[in-house]
Image (cartoon, rainbow, N blue to C red):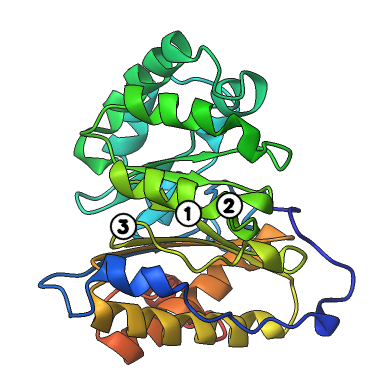
Amino acid sequence: MKFGSVDTPAQIDFTLPPDHPDTLKVLGNKPSDSFDAYVGCAKWNRKDLKGFYPRGTKDELEYYSRQFNSIELNATHYRTYGPDQTKTWADKTPDDFRFFPKVVNRISHFKRLKNVEASLEEYLHGMQGFGEKMEMIFIQMRGDYKPKNIDRIQRFLEVWPNEIPLAFELRHTDWFNDPAVAPQIYQLFEEHNVANIITDTAGRRDLLHMRLTSPVAFIRYVGANHESDYTRLDDWVERIALWKDQGLRKLYFFVHQNKERESPELSAHFIKSLNESIGTTLQIPGEEEQGSLNL
């Protein structure tokens, strides 16, 4: 992922900002009865995750899904797949594996949420093949999608099926940093139980709004291929531990890199730290087949 990349990451202040004050209200300020964590990468193909797959691996998804418990599926952003294909993917994975497909760009980028009912119906028909292995769908808007189009988001959420969990990623800074706009979008997401995605990337620190709109944290983390990537992940573990004590019920954390080949190593570091900090028992990728991934 090139979004937010910089040439000199050592000069960036990667400190996580304080939580938005309403995040605590959404979480409820008491530990929840259950907590689920899903951590993964954005892709499973060998070209992007060079060096991750053992020699002789015949099926990349089958191997990937036995190292991670989830994937942020960006493939569905670029074309519409039918249910036969999504079922084929699902059938290759263990029972507890979960997919997080991205809404097709015809809806988000080309039509920009305008008159998308037919396209949405076609897209969601294809997603049915995942069955119970589809945990949550997410939509990402272009960086030039501005608050003047908030009415389109409202209409989109009104036609979105209530039974399908949804997360929303907005990239124009005014959504979070305009005091007249931010409360409107937060309230809209809360009303529709939509997860407000937090994007952590070097060149766009303004997107760290730290405002949860449901007891679900959906984090898209973009490393900078720099040694600071690991300390940044440790800071996230500390924040997630706090949120869990305050009532967080689900964590969805997906690791990207400017050069994706390092994503599995960063994910393994994050999972190991998370297990040690809050007691999760997630498998550390690569431990069984390949030994340690340089943790």
Q: In this view, does 94 lie above or below 30?
A: above
Q: Position of residue 294 (x, y in %)?
A: 57, 85
Q: Is residue 266 above or below residue 4?
A: below
Q: For the residue carrying disc 3, how many other residues have a C-alpha within 10 Å: few (<14), some (14-19), or many (20+)?
A: many
The disc labelled 1 sits on which kind of residue? Pro
| Quarter of image, res 67 | bottom left
Q: Name the residue under label 3.
A: 214
In the rendered structure, find residue 183 and report the number of the disc placed on it.
1
Report if residue 102 is visible in the image. yes
In the rendered structure, find residue 180 and report the number of the disc placed on it.
2
The disc labelled 2 sits on which kind of residue? Ala
Question: In screen coordinates, is 289 left or right of 163?
Answer: right
Mark 3 lies on a secondary structure that is: loop
Q: For the residue carrying disc 1, how many other residues have a C-alpha within 10 Å: few (<14), some (14-19), or many (20+)?
A: some
Q: How far apart are marks 1 and 2 (CA)?
A: 7 Å
Residue drawn 73% across the image and 60% down it = 259
Residue drawn 20% across the image and 39% down it = 132
Between 125 and 107, the one nearer to me in the picture: 107
Residue drawn 51% across the image and 28% down it = 151
Q: Is residue 262 above or below residue 178?
A: below
Question: In screen coordinates, is 52 left or right of 138?
Answer: right
